[in-house]
Image: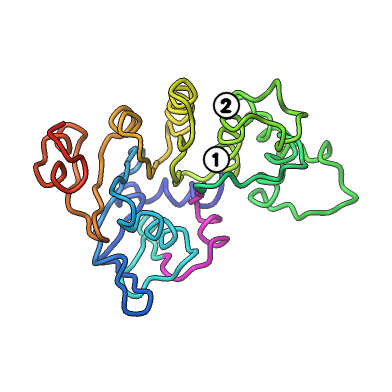
C-alpha cells in the first residue's frame, strides 16, 4: 500500500476527493464554472455530460495536468491544487486516458512492472533484473490476475486486442496501489460483449477503492455508478443516484434528451 492509501485511512471523515469552487479559463473562454463536488471513500462516481461539457478538462485539473484558474482540489482532505501529476500519484490518485497509453513493444508483464517500480520506490536501473525485485514481481503478477491477462503476460502489448489493451491500461492505473482512480471513457470503442466484460473488470478492481469515471455509454454508467454527476457547459447541474438522475427533468432536457 502506498503513502496515499495510508493517508486515506487516517482521514475517512473527509471525502476521498473534493472540488471546491473550481474554475478554469483558457483565455477568455471559461471551461469549468465554479464546480463543487465530493466523492466519498469507496464510492463509484460517474461524470456524464454532452461533448464539450468540460469533463476531460475537469479530469486534467484533478490529476494535475492542468492548473485551475481558481478553486481547490482536495485528496483525502489534503489540498493538491497546483501539484504535478507525479506528486499527486504518489499521494494515492491515478488516472487512465481516452487514448490507450501503453508501451507497445514491452510485454504485458513488463508494462505492469514499470508501473509498479516507481510507486514502490525503485528507480530504473538497467543492470538490475526484475526477478530480483520480489515486491515488484508479486504486485505485477497480482495485477495480471486481476485484469485477466495472466495467459497473455509475455505478449507484446501492441499485439493485444483493443479490449485487452484497455484492460491493461486499467491494470496500469491500479498497479501502483492508488486508492483513488480516474477512468476516462474506459469502454469507448468496445462492442457490447467487450463493454460488459470491461464493466465486470472495473467493478472488481474498484472494490475497496474510490472511482471517478467519465463514460458516454449510459448502460455502463447506470449499471456501475453509485452516484452520477451531470456536467453541462462547465457546470454541475445535477448529482444523485442513478434513479434520481433518470428522473431529473433538467438532466433529461440537457443531456438524456427524453424521459429515461
The reply to whether the magenta stretch includes residue 204 is no
Identify the residue at image location x=46%, y=67%. 66
Q: Is residue 212 visible?
A: no
Question: Residue furthest toward the bottom?
Answer: 27
Q: Which mark is residue 146?
A: 2
Way the structure is coloured = rainbow
**Helix, strand or loop for disc 2:** helix
Q: In which quarter of the image is residue 109?
A: top right
Residue found at the very far front of the displayed protein? 257
The image position of residue 153, as x and y in percent, is 73, 28
Q: Name the residue under label 1.
A: 174
Q: Quarter holding the N terminus?
A: top right
User: Residue 73 at x, y = what percent?
Assistant: 36, 63
Q: How many labels does the image show?
A: 2
Q: Which residue is drawn at 58% across and 40% down?
A: 169
- Where is 203 relative to 12, above or below? above
- Where is residue 41 drawn, in percent x and y? 34, 42
Q: Where is residue 188 in the image (x, y as percent from the top left)?
A: 46, 38
Dots 1 and 2: beta carbons under 8 Å?
A: yes
Task: Check the image and name the residue furthest to the right.
Answer: 127
Could you tell me which secondary element the residue under label 1 belongs to?
Answer: helix
Residue range corresponding to the magenta coloring:
80-95
Q: In this view of the protein, which residue sits in the foreground, 88 or 156?
A: 156
Of the pair 79 and 218, the residue shown nearer to us: 218
Q: How crowded is mark 2: few (under 14 residues within 10 Å), some or many (20 or more)?
A: some
Q: Say which quadrant the C terminus sits in.
A: top left
- Of labels 1 and 2, earlier in sequence is 2
In the image, residue 63 sits, relative to residue 251, either above or below, namely below
Quarter holding residue 253: top left
Amino acid at each position: 500500500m502506498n503513502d496515499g492509501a495510508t493517508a486515506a485511512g487516517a482521514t475517512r471523515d473527509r471525502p476521498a476527493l473534493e472540488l471546491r469552487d473550481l474554475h478554469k479559463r483558457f483565455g477568455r473562454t471559461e471551461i469549468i464554472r465554479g464546480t463543487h463536488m465530493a466523492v466519498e471513500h469507496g464510492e463509484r462516481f460517474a461524470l456524464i455530460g454532452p461533448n464539450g461539457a468540460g469533463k476531460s478538462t475537469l479530469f486534467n485539473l484533478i490529476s494535475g495536468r492542468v492548473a485551475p484558474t481558481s478553486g481547490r482540489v482536495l485528496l483525502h482532505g489534503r489540498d493538491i491544487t497546483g501539484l504535478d501529476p507525479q506528486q499527486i500519484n504518489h499521494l494515492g490518485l491515478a488516472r487512465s486516458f481516452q487514448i490507450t497509453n501503453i508501451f507497445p513493444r514491452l510485454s504485458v508483464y513488463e508494462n505492469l512492472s514499470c508501473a509498479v517500480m516507481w510507486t514502490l520506490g525503485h528507480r530504473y536501473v538497467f543492470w538490475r533484473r526484475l526477478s530480483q525485485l520480489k515486491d515488484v514481481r508479486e504486485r505485477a503478477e497480482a495485477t495480471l490476475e486481476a485484469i485477466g491477462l495472466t495467459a497473455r503476460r509475455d505478449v507484446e502489448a501492441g499485439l493485444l486486442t483493443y479490449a485487452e489493451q484497455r484492460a491493461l491500461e486499467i491494470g496500469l492505473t491500479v498497479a501502483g496501489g492508488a486508492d483513488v482512480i480516474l477512468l476516462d471513457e474506459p469502454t469507448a470503442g468496445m462492442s457490447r460483449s467487450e463493454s460488459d466484460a470491461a464493466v465486470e473488470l472495473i467493478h472488481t478492481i474498484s472494490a475497496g477503492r474510490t472511482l471517478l469515471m467519465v463514460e458516454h455509454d449510459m448502460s455502463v454508467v447506470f449499471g456501475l455508478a453509485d452516484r452520477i454527476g451531470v456536467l453541462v457547459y462547465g457546470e454541475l447541474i445535477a448529482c444523485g443516484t442513478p434513479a434520481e438522475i433518470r428522473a431529473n427533468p433538467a438532466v433529461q432536457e440537457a443531456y438524456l434528451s427524453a424521459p429515461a
